[in-house]
Amino acid sequence: MAKPKRPIPFSVSLRGIAMVLAATALLLVGVLRGELMATLIGILLFSFLLYSLALAAIARIFWGESAISFGWTHGTPKGFETSVRTFDRNRMVLSFARFALDIEYVAAKESRFFLSVDIAPRTSISYPALPPRGVYEGGTPRLRITDYAGFFSFFVEQTGAVPERLVVIPDPYSVPRPFLPGGTTGVVRGKGVFNRSEDLFDARPYQIGDDPRKINWKLFAHTGKLAVRQGDLLPPPSSEILFIINCTVRSIDRFEYRAAFDSLISRVAHIAEVLLSERRIVTLKYCGHTGQLETVRLDPSDPASSRRLYTYLADISPTTSIAAEALIRGARPSGIAAVFVSLPTLTHADVKALSDGGIHFALIGPSGFFRGNEGPASFIKRLLVVQDRLNTNGIRKPRRLSFRETLTLLEREGFHAEEI
């Protein structure tokens, strides 16, 4: 078992290396060629370097192994807030050098976020920019002690200050409310909804999600209230909506695919929040940051359901290892309306799995990230079916459809597909 690498306790910046080389060169030129001015400048530069190193070293020695307190808060008026508190015995040392706390955060998709907070006496508060959506685990914080010229740095690990997990929630992106399938329960949480018996009635109250084509406009003209023709035996909107989020992307290393997936999650956040405000139960099935399939259920009667929604959506991570079939398999419990949410990168096998799973509603998007994505070289390769279309076993890989092809295929197979 390989031993973990020990952190480097001391480093010299490029500026410091350049200063050392310049001072050495001037001193050599002055001594070898008898240039008094070069000699004096070289000595002055070396003196300044030693002075800077001495101040940083004194600060490091007096600091010792003392720890500091670190914390962060999300949702403040200015956004993401970090605070660092120093103890009384350490505040005197802060005048000798510059102090900063460095923490490296890593998400499951290998996204890295480097946080550096400058330390001032008592409490330091800063508002750094947030990284992309995700769940980030922080490494061991390191205190960086640097001389004011920026030549030399000493590092002290803060083993007692373990950073908490950083959860960056998505920003909801407003989209028109899509048509959602009707369910079989006939009950909406928190509202009284008429349950049909064997008797037929001409109309029932309109509910959000009903087909607008079935509105009884004559009745609306007399009563001023929207109602749906009951004789058509339309099921009322389902009390529970299951969102099956396809986390499969072509490449998690390419920025455009990660950005498109984050934009898709932002759209789902807006739709799900609207459903919760309408007292609908929302269930999410997705791939979490650990790589495992997760299923969570949000009840609108829970006051924290909206906050939990965004926490779960932050946990969703794109992957290349889990196929859409794994998400679809066994995903739809009886009586729950299921909606498949995906980027426009489906294959024919994915569409077949949806059909076999009894799921006929899909939300596809966003389209803007993929327009013009295929260049001339990719187009020629696709026409010629060259080796990059084959895997290591020589089996032809399934071609993923474009945005327009995806919508056309879904509609041809009898799906109700909408762009979000």
Image (cartoon, grey):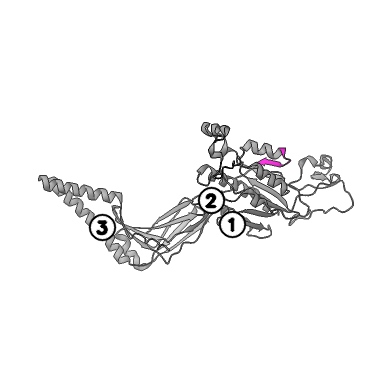
Disc 3 secondary structure class: helix
Residue drawn where x is 53% and y is 38% of the image: 387
What segment carries the magenta color?
412-420
Q: Is residue 181 left or right of residue 31?
A: right
The residue indicated by pointer 3 is 53
User: The residue under label 2 is which amino acid type?
Assistant: Arg
Q: Is residue 181 left or right of residue 15?
A: right
Q: Picture coordinates of residue 203 (x, y %)?
A: 84, 46
Disc 2 secondary structure class: loop
Q: Picture coordinates of residue 93 (x, y %)?
A: 31, 63
Disc 1 secondary structure class: loop
Mark 1 or mark 2, which is nearer to you? 1
Q: Which mark is residue 292?
A: 1
Q: Residue furthest right?
A: 199
In depth, the one of 1 and 326 nearer the eye is: 1
Q: Is the residue marked by circle 2 packed among few (<14), some (14-19), or many (20+) residues within 10 Å?
A: many
